[in-house]
Image (cartoon, helix red, strand yellow):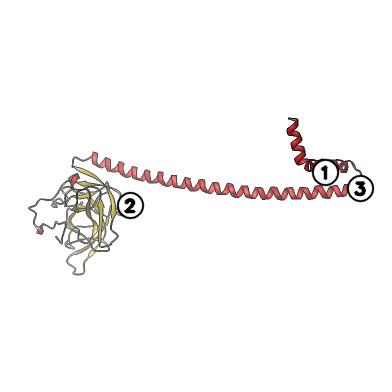
Amino acid sequence: MFRFISKVWARFKEYFVLVILILFSLIILSQNQNQNVQKLRAIAFGSFASVTSLLTDLFSVTNLKRENEELRRTNAKLMMQISKLRSYGIVNSELKSLLELKDTSSLPFIPSTVVSRSLSMTQNTITLNAGSNDNVLPGMPVINDQGLIGIIHSVSDDYSIARTINNVDFKLTVMDERSRVNGILKWTGEELVIINIPFTFDVEIGDRIVSSEISSIVPIPIPVGIVSEFKAGESGVFSYIKVKPFVDLTPIENVFILAQVRSKQIDDLELNFYRRNK
């Protein structure tokens, strides 16, 4: 122990002497009542206080910046977590609605998820992760809890492509739910309309449009949309009927494929088809 103290003293004795002398000088100055010494002491203490305050402020600013950065990082993490939770909530709500739809119907449903979609305004299609291995066939309707989405057009082993109602090659026989008037639903590239209905037939704005009972593509009445505009066409004989669809195609992710296909005996004159170019 004594040897250790001797080594420390031999190595740092100059510093120890300096500290002792400074402390001794401060003690003497604090005891001196001379007016000049007191002024000098006040200046020294004021300068020391100013320097200390400046250093404290610098450290405080640094700490505040560090704290703000941590808070921003925490907020970003919370935002991502909230975003995920909202996404899970939306998907859960959608899946719950689909399950309720499945539970209230005896028809065969094949659950599926949209894996990709086209961006064309005229040839709008969606790709689903269900194919022939899941018993999906061309001509099967694609729906969700809000209504009709489209018709299966082509199928591979594990995937299928559906033409949506916003596709110029999609046509379907539909019916005014109130008046039972039938017509052909099609997409013009800009809007959904019903054609081949005389202007004198009973159709009103706000009427619900469903798939027609005479359509064998869709064997049951499935909601399609509501009449948003009704007026005489350019010829004055047939009416112009604009339909606002129930299903917003942009956010859909989870769907059902209705495992029903049309009869092979259907003639094209019955106004039902799902692949015009075949």
Q: Distance between the Cα atoms at labels 1 and 3?
A: 21 Å
Q: Distance between the Cα atoms at labels 1 and 2?
A: 77 Å
Q: Identify the residue shown where x is 44% and y is 47%.
A: 80
Look at the numbered disc 1 and give the secondary structure of its residue. helix
- Count of numbered circles on the image: 3
Q: Which residue is identified by label 2? A: 251
Q: Which residue is identified by label 1? A: 22
Q: Identify the residue shown where x is 69% and y is 47%.
A: 56
Q: Toward the viewer: 119 or 273?
A: 119
Q: Nearer the viewer, mark 1 or mark 2?
A: 1
Q: Which residue is identified by label 3? A: 35
Q: Distance between the Cα atoms at labels 3 and 2?
A: 84 Å
Q: Which of marks 1 and 3 is in front?
A: 1
Q: How crowded is mark 1: few (under 14 residues within 10 Å), some or many (20 or more)?
A: few
Q: Where is residue 184 in the image (x, y as percent from the top left)?
A: 17, 59
Q: Is 155 located above or below residue 119 in the figure?
A: above
Q: Which amino acid does label 2 sit on?
A: Pro
Q: If you read the primary sequence from the N terminus, does the residue marked by circle 3 or circle 2 appear first?
A: 3
Q: What residue type is labelled 1?
A: Ile
Q: Residues within 10 Å of mark 3 (few under 14, many from 20)?
A: few
Q: Which amino acid does label 3 sit on?
A: Gln
The residue at the far top in this view is: 1
The residue at the far bottom in this view is: 235
**Which quadrant of the figure has residue 20?**
top right
